[in-house]
Structure formats: structure tokens, C-alpha cells
Amino acid sequence: MSKHYEKQAKQVVKGFKEVLDEEARKVLTEEDLGQLAMLIESAITNAVLSAVEKVADDLEKSVRKIRRGAEHYDD
């Protein structure tokens, strides 16, 4: 999945370069843009992992609720 995020980050950087004027493009090196891509990839990864963690927490709560219901089914 990381390759997917890397590809997305590079697409964002490509779009960023396109909106820069010529002078700004001359100032930024490929290394600068590579670092920007890494920061973007990291942000994407953190956002996705946070969302997955929230879903896992919600699922865990639901499982506990179902289990409690099953334990008291005959009551």
C-alpha cells in the first residue's frame, strides 16, 4: 500500500510544480521536491492509519456489544 501512497504523493508534488511560476520552479531542487513528496506520503499514511484505527475501535465496541447480547440471550 505504501507504493500507492508514494504514487499519490508524487502526483500532488507534480500538481504543485504546475501551479508554481517559472522562478519558483528554478529555486526548488529535485531533492526539495522529493522531501515534499515524503512529507505528503507520511501525512497520507498517518491519515489512513488513524481512520483504520478508528474503524477498528468501533468494530471492537460492536463486537463487545454483540457478545454481551449473546451472553444474555436467554435472560
Image (cartoon, rainbow, N blue to C red):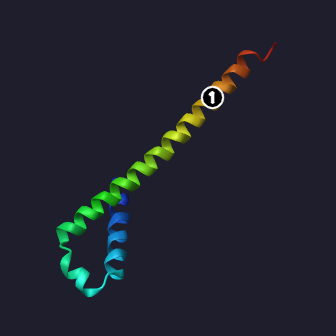
Q: Residue lying furthest right in this view?
A: 75
Q: Would you place residue 21 above or below residue 58 in this image?
A: below
Q: Would you place residue 21 above or below residue 61 in this image?
A: below
The number of numbered badges drawn on the structure is 1
- The percent position of residue 1, horizontal first and vertical second, equals 38, 53
Q: Would you place residue 75 above or below residue 1 in this image?
A: above
- The percent position of residue 40, horizontal first and vertical second, equals 34, 60
Q: Residue lying furthest bottom in this view?
A: 22
Q: Residue at x 30, y 85 (%)?
A: 21
Q: Residue at x 50, y 46 (%)?
A: 51
- The percent position of residue 56, horizontal first and vertical second, equals 53, 37
> Which type of secondary structure does the marked residue at label 1 adopt?
helix
Within the image, what quadrant is residue 15 found in? bottom left
Q: Is residue 25 left or right of residue 4?
A: left
- The percent position of residue 59, horizontal first and vertical second, equals 59, 35
- For label 1, the residue is 63
Quadrant the C terminus occupies: top right
Q: Is residue 61 left or right of residue 26?
A: right
Amino acid at dot 1: Val
Q: Rate crowding at label 1 as few (under 14), some (14 to 19) or many (20 or more) other CA atoms within 10 Å.
A: few
Q: Residue at x 63, y 25 (%)?
A: 64
Q: Would you place residue 17 above or below residue 68 in this image?
A: below
Within the image, what quadrant is residue 73 found in? top right
| 63 and 31: which is toward the camera | 31
